[in-house]
Amino acid sequence: MRIITFGTFDVFHIGHVNILERAKELGTHLIVGVSSDALNISKKGRPPIYNESDRMKIVESLHCVDEVFLEESLELKGEYIIAHKADVLVMGDDWAGKFDHYSNLCKVHYFPRTEGISTTKIIDVVRSTTVS
Ligand code: C2G
């Protein structure tokens, strides 16, 4: 079974490891779409802390990940699912319900998010503890 998932994976943390490991357990081949810097700027109004090539390299280095590609548009998920012959789309449950319409192309599965950690939280903690 081929699994596909998407994310920014900026300031890589344990929540990212958890979802990627859980995703891999659903199948045999894990493909990860890492969202581009341009997509993040248009979505969040700021570039990620780590650039797209570093984020792709970090994700690719995990032993549970078999393949990485650049996600250039949120609207292209259907095309990515077809191109990568994915059987299951996995996302964290902050996206629950948002990708159900792809269930005509593959199974759609949401895992619970890891509690208490996020890239935004890490950035806030670092910012508030940095002495300038
Ligand atoms: N995640 C998680 N637990 C956390 C933080 C993140 O399970 N504490 C999951 C998210 O639910 C997502 C994945 O990790 O499935 C990547 O999260 P982000 O890097 O925040 O990605 P996001 O900005 O949601 O980008 O096309 C969709 C986008 O590319 C998703």
Image: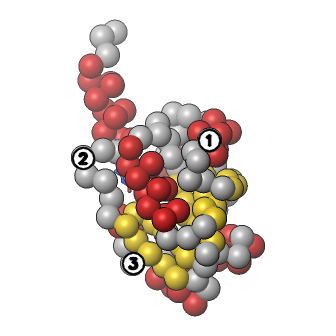
Q: Nearer the viewer, mark 1 or mark 3?
A: 1
Mark 1 Cα within 10 Å, few/some/many (few <14, many 20+)?
Answer: few
| Nearer to us in this view, 106 or 132 | 106
Mark 2 Cα within 10 Å, few/some/many (few <14, many 20+)?
Answer: few
Chain-order first, disc 3 or disc 2: 3
The label shown at residue 116 is 2
Q: Which residue is mark 3?
A: 97
Q: Report how far apart the C-alphas of labels 1 and 2 lie in the structure.
A: 25 Å
- Quarter of the rendering containing residue 54: top right
Q: Is residue 82 above or below residue 17?
A: below
Q: Position of residue 8 (x, y in %)?
A: 53, 50
Chain-order first, disc 1 or disc 2: 1
| Nearer to us in this view, 99 or 46 | 99
Of the residues shown, which amino acid type is indicated by label 1? Ser
Q: Position of residue 71 (x, y in %)?
A: 65, 58
Q: Position of residue 42 (x, y in %)?
A: 56, 52
Q: Residue at x 44, y 75 (%)?
A: 109
Contact between labelled residues 2 and 3, with CB atoms less than 8 Å apart: no
Mark 2 CB near ligand 1 (8 Å cut): yes
Q: Nearer the viewer, mark 1 or mark 2?
A: 1
Residue 109 appears left or right of 120: right
Q: How is the image coloured?
A: secondary structure
Of the residues shown, which amino acid type is indicated by label 3? Gly
Q: Residue at x 41, y 40 (%)?
A: 13
Mark 3 Cα within 10 Å, few/some/many (few <14, many 20+)?
Answer: few
Q: Which residue is mark 1?
A: 61
Of the residues shown, which amino acid type is indicated by label 2? Gly
Chain-order first, disc 1 or disc 3: 1
Q: Quadrant of ligand 1?
A: bottom left
